[in-house]
Image (cartoon, rainbow, N blue to C red):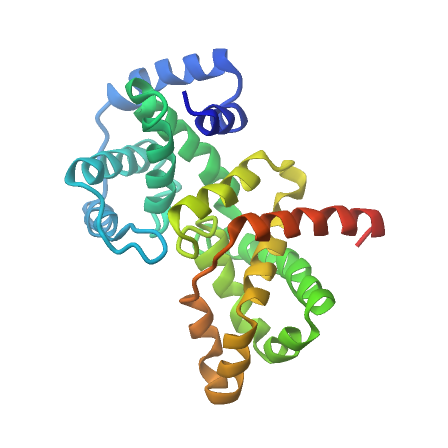
Amino acid sequence: MSKRAEVWKNYLLGDYEHVVQARKMYHNIVVQHPYLIDTTLQRQIEADVPRTHFGSTMTPASDRLQKIIKTLLIQYVQVMPCDGYLQGFNYIAMILYRVYSNNDAEFALADTWWSMVSVLAIIRPMIPDHDPRDFMRYTDRWSRYYKNHIKLKNARVHAFLEPHYNIICPMITVKWLMIWFAQLFEYNDLLIVWDALITCDPSRRTKLMAIIAANVTIQQESQIENWSRTCPSELGGRMYNIRAREAETIINESRAAMIEYKLLSV
């Protein structure tokens, strides 16, 4: 049995009784009821799933796994039409299913589907099209933590980025935070990041995400300096394509900063 899968389910779905109930509801509500789906969304899902890869690994998932992820995403859109589908949801479904299918294959579909519901509820304020006002409030909130941490920990990086924060921060909301850093890390490192985010106190998750993003940014100091000197107008776009490393170090430093700021009331 995978300890990681059990911990994730405990935080995202609740205790064992809740998990059992969720599995029954998945069968009764999701599987047994056909729903219509917008063909445009279905085509988008079918195009996105083969492109779901992590870090430098460009090899697509197996045909079988792709079919499962497509099914989960289509079911989500069918049952939750108000949320719809956005690029990035494919990463969330893929990560959850890969972890759960290694633990309890029989119930992996149900556990993944309901965990998707939980995770997507958390990221909803990060979706620009869902509610632009929520998106701007969320971006303003987390970016204060992000900018303050960079300023405190690496004044040089802060100086390079300060003229570009108005472009960088909304981009990070959508491209990093909305998919919980799925495109930044290699898969095994990404699981360490998700361990931290899933088990974090919900009231402090936004701050933790901001500090993780800041530490990933600081890690790119030499690249940021080079981009600032050679192509400053492209710095925001270059940030979009960075690759993070040493997830365990980043998480440990981020947790330490959370304790430090709590003591300092920052």
Residue 208: % across, % down:
63, 48
- Residue 98 is situated, as x and y percent measured from the top left of the image, at 33, 35
* 164 sits left or right of 184 in the view: right
Identify the residue at the far bottom of this view: 230
Residue at figure coordinates x 60%, y 61% from the top left:
214
The quarter in which the N terminus is drawn is: top left
In the image, taking residue 151 as reference, residue 137 lies left or right, namely left
Q: Residue at x 53, y 21 (%)?
A: 14
Residue at the limit of the structure toward the left, as seen here: 63
| Vertical position of residue 63 compared to residue 234: above or below | above
Foreground of the two, 133 or 27: 27
Residue 36: quarter of image? top left
Count of numbered circles in the view? 0
Q: Residue 48: image x %, image y %?
A: 25, 51
Image coords of residue 127 (percent x, y): 46, 52
Position of 101 relative to 247 (above/below): above
Quick check: 133 above or below 2? below
Quarter of the image for the C terminus: give it: bottom right
In front of the other: 31 or 210: 210
Q: Residue at x 47, y 70 (%)?
A: 239
Residue depicted at 18% across the width and 46% down the height: 39
Of 116 and 188, nearer the camera is 188
